[in-house]
Amino acid sequence: MLNFLKKLFKIRPQIFLASDLHLDHKNIIRYCNRPFRNVHQMNYTLIRNWNKTVCKRDVVYFLGDFVLSRGNRRRVLNFIKSLNGRKIFIRGNHDKFLRSYNHFILKYKGRSFYLVHDPFDIPVDWKGWAISGHTHQRGKFIDIENKRINVSPELIGYKPVNIREIVRLIEK
């Protein structure tokens, strides 16, 4: 329905951010206390939440640790195809088979955001906002004092977050 309405009203593509899905990673459920019974339920829920949030025309910056691939390139590509949107990948420590950036500078509404998987890889001289994942539930979604945003799924409701929502929160 959301896709239909966007097409009908010719709504511009939106920008979303997410990280650390860890699809097919059974142990992440326990490590991060994720609310799933098993890896199949986790994969299904994460994909469903993504596709209910993101339309085919939208853009998603994915900040690393997409899937625990274990050498199965076809499985990784199937996961990518199953998710709505144009995906721009920033490399995480678990990523293989993905064409990806080490970092990316996203310009949005007069702001520059440094996108990277691990917050420890943010340059010390970066003065603007930085968006990362990697730390999962440790820390806050938005750290105003340090200009840091964590888009790990445990902090953003297990679905991608819209850049407009981020900007709205940091401007408060």
Image (cartoon, rainbow, N blue to C red):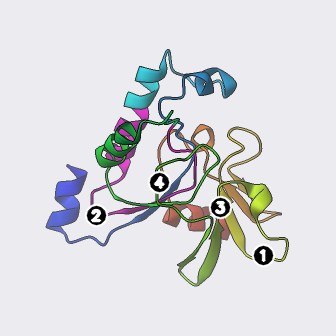
Mark 3 vs 1, N-terminal side:
3
Where does label 1 land, which residue? 126
Task: Tell me whether circle 2 and circle 3 mark residues in contact (CB < 8 Å).
Answer: no
Q: CA distance from mark 4 to mark 2?
A: 20 Å
As drawn, the label of residue 98 is: 4
Which mark is nearer the camera, 4 or 2?
4
Q: Is residue 144 magenta?
A: no
Span shown in magenta? 45-67
Mark 4 vs 2, N-terminal side:
2
Establish if 26 lies above or below 157: above
Q: CA distance from mark 1 to mark 4?
A: 26 Å
Establish if 16 lies above or below 134: below
Residue 172 visible to an observer of this rendering: no
Where does label 2 land, which residue? 57
Q: Is residue 65 magenta?
A: yes
Q: CA distance from mark 3 to mark 4?
A: 15 Å
Which mark is nearer the camera, 2 or 3?
3
Between 82 and 158, the residue placed more toward the observer is 82
